Image (tube, grey):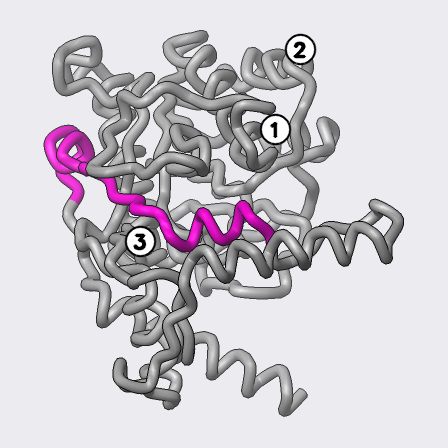
Amino acid sequence: MDPVLVLGGCRGLGHHIIKQLLDTKKALDVTAFDVRSDVNRVPGAKYIEGSITSEKDVRSVLETVKPKVIMHTVSPQLMGQKNTQKLYEDINTVKALVYTSSSSVIHNNITDLVEATEEGRLFYWPEQTEFYSHTKAMAEDLIQGANQHNGLFTTRLRGTGRMRFQIGDGTKLFDMTYIGNFAHAHILAAEALLRDSDGRADRDGPLKVNGEAFVITNDDHWPFWDLFRAIAAEAGHPVSKDKVTVVPTSVYYALAVIGEWVVWVFSLGSKESNINRRMVKYLTMTRTFDISKAKERLGYRPQVGMQEGIKRAVQYYLEHESDKKSN
């Protein structure tokens, strides 16, 4: 794959991608591009500081690295379409671009998602109630438009997931993704794009990867509140189900409405309540996905199960919180 450029390489997902690339020796020339390069460093990787929102910085890192593969893991601000397309046209040495999107692009945050696939249509503002998801959908359109342009092959990966009480009956199922599994999917996607670009695969056939979107999960539906209780237990705060206070959805919804109005009144409309109706809906809906497409075309299988993923994530968090306090 050399050379590989990981945009957002010092953040959680980018860090995992770089570590897996170097550990598996699927790439030896790996550069991280991020606004801060002093965190989450991996021995053997190169680091360049800059902002994805700066055309000058982006052009500079492309000219310096001359990447064959780009992993775009940053959640960027909305960029002008004209400038963004011009940047893609200038990346004429790149063969593979893997863009980190979100499963929320096909969800309006109102209806349940049950075994949803990549075929669902994209939602845009204002029909899309979360502006973050709107910008992700627009970015997907740009990435899709750049596919097979000047020899560039692109694909989009959609990740999922982003106590002594629970809202609702706790039966709603949710899909999450351990970050290491998501990183693994990025590497599989890059390898598949390179096969497409080199003519080693039927790039326009039924199993093509370029120009496609793939949902990546742990392939293990969990009741939403069970997940958070498992996290709490791993952190040393187990809660038995018989001690859980169940707050009816209607009651919490009413509290959210009151909270929204109180914050709006006292801030003169300048602030939004942290407890709001959108959050209540999000915490009480079914949100599951069918990842058959990723299994079939990328050969993706979760490398780390949910329980082990929770253990690793909590241990990482506790260790780093301890380091912060000691410093």
Q: Earlier in the sequence, mark 1 or mark 2?
A: 1
- Mark in front: 1 vs 2: 2
Q: Viewed as shown, does residue 220 lie left or right of 321? A: left
Depth check: give the residue in front, 108 or 74: 108
Q: Earlier in the sequence, mark 3 or mark 1?
A: 1
Give the residue at x 30% y 46%: 286
Element under disc 3: loop
Q: Label 3: which residue? A: 177
Q: Label 1: which residue? A: 63
Q: Specify the amino acid type for callout 1.
A: Glu
Is 94 contained in the magenta span? no
Give the residue at x 66% y 34%: 77
The range drawn in magenta is 276-300
Check the image and name the residue furthest to the right.
268
Q: Which mark is residue 12?
A: none
How far is disc 2 from disc 3 in space, using C-alphas?
A: 34 Å
Q: Label 2: which residue? A: 82
How far is disc 1 from disc 2 in space, using C-alphas?
A: 21 Å
